[in-house]
Image (cartoon, rainbow, N blue to C red):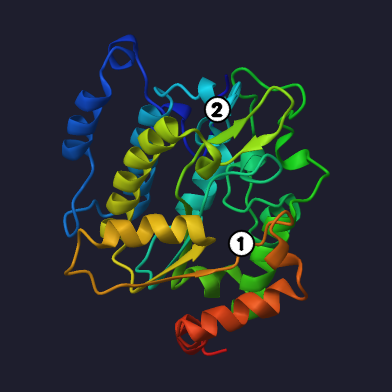
Amino acid sequence: MAVSKVCKQSDILKTSATEDEESLEHRHKRRETEIPSTGTHSDNICDDILTIERIQCELLLQLDYSSSHVTHVYNPIDYASEPHCYYVRQYGNGKKQVLFIGMNPGPFGMAQNGVPFGDVTQVKEWLGVKGQVFKPENENPNRPVKGLSITRNEVSGTRFWSLMKSIAGTPKAFFSICYVHNYCPLCFMTASGKNVTPPSLKVRERKQLESICDKSLTDFILLSNVRYIVCVGKYVETRAKLIAKDFTSWKIEIGSITHPSPINPSANRGDWVAMATQQLREMNVLPVMINENHI
């Protein structure tokens, strides 16, 4: 496999025969020494973001999802590492005030290009993300990965980035105070190509996934030191608020906007962008975004 000019594959997912034999418990302990604690992160916060994601992927890929009829697991942090690293390094640096958290990659969005809410038009034309995308291991023939050449748009991504464009105008203005991250970096699907989301996993598998993702999200929140967390959908909001209970000293406001997925009936009732804008206003996040960007 070719090496990215933006970010080497090994920078994202470093696995070896020794690591494969590690227990989940051992990996959880090891991550505590690898993940920087708040106030001690490296000069380049993007390196720390990539480290958190790499270790999270390693742990999640050790789980067995077969009882939930999952036959294919896509890890776009790996095979789409070039555009993913471009996104992180282009937009992850600097102090942020607002963190938007999505659930996990969709098969026609981030699973294609490594960018959260990765509608291909928004990713290429508004975010300006570049990079080569390779094929995932065990590719599902019903959900081929075509990278930035895919012609199908993702409704969730179109709606989400249209909202940010309507508020901030430019990526530079938006990412000067905001960042977008996913709770889980993997995409799950059945043999037919049906998307399997984290909350729809069987209880045992879901709890194992949540244990790993909750810890990774905690690491990410401590690293980013934001004032507001905007969860895209109620599932992620529930996870974020459960995490926050263990950190009573956090001075972070946590809320949510309606998930923009077309399979969510609430998202299809009128103008989703207008609805989400009002929800941001009610959370007092919209004034922060507008005032900081002098829009």
Which disc is residue 27 wearing? none
Q: Is residue 192 above or below residue 170?
A: above
Q: Is residue 17 above or below residue 99?
A: above
Res 122 visible: no
Mark 1 is on which residue type? His
Q: Is residue 83 left or right of residue 240?
A: right
Under tag 2, what secondary structure? Answer: helix
Q: Earlier in the sequence, mark 1 or mark 2?
A: 2
Q: Which residue does the numbered mark 2 point to in the structure image?
A: 68
Which residue is painted at 66% across and 21% down in the image? 139
Under tag 1, what secondary structure? Answer: loop
Q: Position of residue 21 (x, y in %)?
A: 29, 12
Q: Which residue does the numbered mark 1 point to in the structure image?
A: 259
Q: Position of residue 42 (x, y in %)?
A: 24, 51
Q: Is residue 176 above or below residue 289?
A: above
Q: Is residue 117 above or below residue 59?
A: below
Q: Is residue 33 left or right of residue 77?
A: left
The outermost residue toward the right is 151
Which residue is painted at 46% across and 72% down in the image? 176
Mark 2 is on which residue type? Ser
Question: Foreground residue, 265 or 17?
Answer: 265
How many numbered marks does the figure carry?
A: 2
Q: Is residue 195 left or right of residue 51?
A: right
Mark 2 Cα within 10 Å, few/some/many (few <14, many 20+)?
A: some
Mark 1 Cα within 10 Å, few/some/many (few <14, many 20+)?
A: many
Tag nearer the camera, 1 or 2: 2
Q: Position of residue 289 (x, y in %)?
A: 49, 81
Quadrant in the rendering for residue 264: bottom right
